[in-house]
Image (cartoon, rainbow, N blue to C red):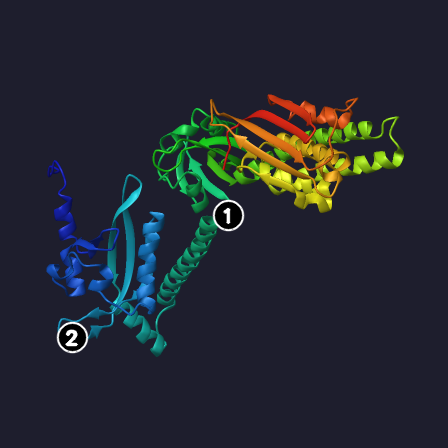
Amino acid sequence: MLARPASIDFETLFAASPNPYVLLAPDLTIVTMNQAYLDATMRERHELVGRKMLDAFPSDPASESHQLLQGSLDRVLRTGARDELALIRYDIELPSGGYDERYWSATHSPLLHEGQVAYILQHTVDVTELQRLRTFAAEAGHYTRDEAGVFERAHAVQEANQTLSRETQRLRTLFEQAPGFIAVITGPELRFQLANAAYRRLVANRDVIGKTVAEALPEVVDQGFTTLLDRVLTTGEPFIGRSVSVMLGAEGDEPLEERFLDFIYQPIFAGDGTTLGVFVQGHDVTEQRRAKDHQQLLIHELNHRVKNTLSIVQALAMQSFNDSAEPAAARQTFDARLNALSAAHNLLTMENWESAGLPETIKASVAATAGANVERVSILGPNIVVAPQTAVSIAMTIHELCTNAIKYGALSNEAGTVDVRWTVSPETDGLVDLRIDWCESGGPAVPPPTRRGFGTRLIERGLSAELRSTVTLDFDPSGLKCTIIAKLPAAIE
């Protein structure tokens, strides 16, 4: 009895095999081949090694031969699975020139390394003579039923493979282009098998295929997502998440970014009912969630502002329609005050209620009150931005000063004028001192009032309650002078 060799020299075995073999790299470069392959293709080794397969054996790219060979190799690279061509015509260039008509049966087997195609081993069988005999017999009409069945089955298998390949490609295209993110995770180690373009975008185009969830997306482990996946695998019950917050890594060294996802973890079952993996499908709803949160914030803010506005209107109405006021005069006063309030609100609406420019606020209030006398009011000062409540307070104060000037002061005759000036001090601790000076001249002498009405009290109250302000009224014989000083956040343009 002969002893077996301690080890097998596979290179020698490969070289000695009577079957033609050629080894291709993933880019279809010819790496090596055995002597049987060189004999079958009538080539020398140096003519083939290092060349691309379709360059070494050229064919018309539009031909069926080219498309069948290219398609089979592409399927192996894409799926990592073996692919067979039952029958392919692929003519071989003769050393003497011209081409020899050849028919082949080919098997393309992937050689994998760490789950990726490292090489493709092509095993070809020259079936030219068999094909010619079949053609001759068919033309003569006397090939056997068994022979006919063999060829018909071979063609049927190849046609079925091609149909299946086309269907697979369509499904892969749909999977890749789906608007929602999709991934397939298998095994107890939770390893990624598939992930479409939307999923890759979600995870900042990180390479996840072949890696476990913990390896590919370490930041989601402590957030409980691997625990959820384990639960789906164990129980076989799906998990549905609605607007779930997840912190995901961005590209480079950027900090984690919060995203909101609608998704489902759907178990994948084998034929015997065991759970093989998890099908992940969902949509990134971050923008919708943020829009909803922003809308809710706006609703709360609108509610707050409406309440403030109604409080102001209520105070105006109570003071305008007091027991001592004539109905017609009270209504006129109330309408004027509402117009001033409306002018301030219009300015704030134009700026989305974030702020208002002081020059525009004062000009709008004067225009709403003085009417044709607006040209007799001089306005000058730096462009300072004030908060919404401050803008409303200033507008109402200017309105009351303007109203008094029209009734009793500089705007009650044809010659009087009003000079409105304001200045701001240098910034200190993020605040500036705003000083507004209202100076009337050319009108009748204005004596101090014997009683303080609502208008006077509104002026003396100063600006919005949340700001520190002081107001001084000087009933000078030459004309009323009003000075307002308030501390504001620094926001000068």
* Residue 296 image position (x, y, % from top left): 63, 33
Give 326 or 465, whichever is nearer the viewer: 326
Mark 2 residue type: Gly
Is label 2 in a helix, a strand or a loop? loop
The residue nearer to you, when weighing 6 against 236, is: 236
Disc 1 marks which residue? 179
Residue with the mark numbered 2:
97
In the rendered structure, the answer to whether residue 304 lies left or right of residue 250 reads right
Q: Position of residue 388 (x, y in %)?
A: 62, 33
Determine if residue 357 is in view.
no
> Quick check: 171 left or right of 469?
left
The vertical placement of 119 against 42, above or below, is: above
Q: Earlier in the sequence, mark 1 or mark 2?
A: 2
Contact check, label 1 and label 2, Cβ < 8 Å: no
Q: Amino acid at mark 1?
A: Pro
Q: Quadrant of residue 293?
A: top right
Tell me if I can see residue 136 in this picture.
Answer: yes
* 443 or 425: nearer the viewer: 443
Q: Residue at x 69, y 23 (%)?
A: 460
Placement of 219 over or under 177, stated as above or below = above
Residue at horizontal 24 percent and vertical 72 percent from the top: 101
Rounded to the nearest whole Å, what is the CA distance between mark 1 and mark 2?
A: 53 Å
Along the horizontal axis of the image, is 354 left or right of 457?
left
Between label 1 and label 2, give the one nearer the viewer. Answer: 1
